[in-house]
Image: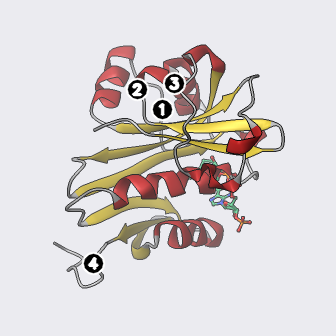
Amino acid sequence: MESKEWYYRLGDQTFMVSTKPELLSHDFIQASFSDPIMYWAKPISSENLRIMLDNSCLLGLYLKSPDPLPPSESTAENLVSPAAPLQPPFMFTQIGMARLVTDYMTLAFLTDVFVVPEHQGKGLGKWMIQCVKKLTDAMPELRRVMFMAKNAPHAVKFYEELLDAKMHDQERGKVVFMSSRDPEVDVLS
Ligand SMILES: CC(C)(COP(=O)(O)OP(=O)(O)OC[C@H]1O[C@@H](n2cnc3c(N)ncnc32)[C@H](O)[C@@H]1OP(=O)(O)O)[C@@H](O)C(=O)NCCC(=O)NCCS
């Protein structure tokens, strides 16, 4: 699938979400997988990480430095791709991610949603999930987006609101979510 970028300006900081695999920091992903905050993941070998990335759509969340976007591009409208050309990769520091395991057509499984603690609470997690939704909404034959989350009110609210998802099942402190373009679709189809 053609790669996508979105930009978001917050004060004097510019953030980017990109699906370009070449921008991803494998070191960042491995460090995140070994962080207890991503309690569901663990570090994997470099070779297995490469295979995982080759078979996923990983949205990287980056802090752009130090060159800010021109004022005309620094509005809330930055939820869509701007006209600005992509800067060289060294201009971006990865600070988060969200991963879709998908056929880009009918189904997507969302996992590994993470923003580093120092950038949490700024709206970046919500923005990143809005970018995820833009990708899944563009899938021509989409039946379902599925994911699991902590069974906690803030997590449930987060995904229900942003992905228009409904809680489908619960087990061992986790909830299983599904969102569907067609509300009439059978949950088991
Ligand atoms: C979940 C997470 C990605 C949210 O990113 P963020 O940039 O802090 O999110 P935002 O600033 O856009 O929004 C914060 C909102 O997310 C909600 N939220 C959802 N899940 C959360 C979580 N696990 N931890 C903290 N806040 C969470 C908060 O309640 C808050 O809601 P509010 O705005 O209504 O008060 C981030 O907290 C994180 O990486 N947590 C650790 C990993 C994780 O738990 N991932 C999700 C697995 S289900």
Q: How many labels does the image show?
A: 4
Please name which of the two marks, 3 or 4, marks the residue nearer to the observer.
4
Residue named by callout 4: 182
Using the numbered discs, state the Cα–Cα distance from disc 1 to disc 3 in whole angstroms. 8 Å
Q: Where is residue 109 in the image (x, y as percent from the top left)?
A: 33, 53
Can the viewer see residue 151 in this picture?
no
The residue at the point 45 percent across, 52 percent down is 132
Residue type of the residue flagged with mark 2: Pro
Badge 2 or badge 3: first in the primary sequence: 2
Badge 3 or badge 4: first in the primary sequence: 3
Q: Where is residue 183 in the image (x, y as percent from the top left)?
A: 30, 82
Image position of 26 with respect to 17: above or below: above
Using the numbered discs, state the Cα–Cα distance from disc 2 to disc 4 in whole angstroms. 31 Å
Using the numbered discs, state the Cα–Cα distance from disc 2 to disc 3 in whole angstroms. 15 Å
Residue 123 vs residue 7: left or right?
A: right
Residue type of the residue flagged with mark 4: Asp
Residue 130 vs residue 181: left or right?
A: right
The residue at the point 71 percent across, 33 percent down is 69
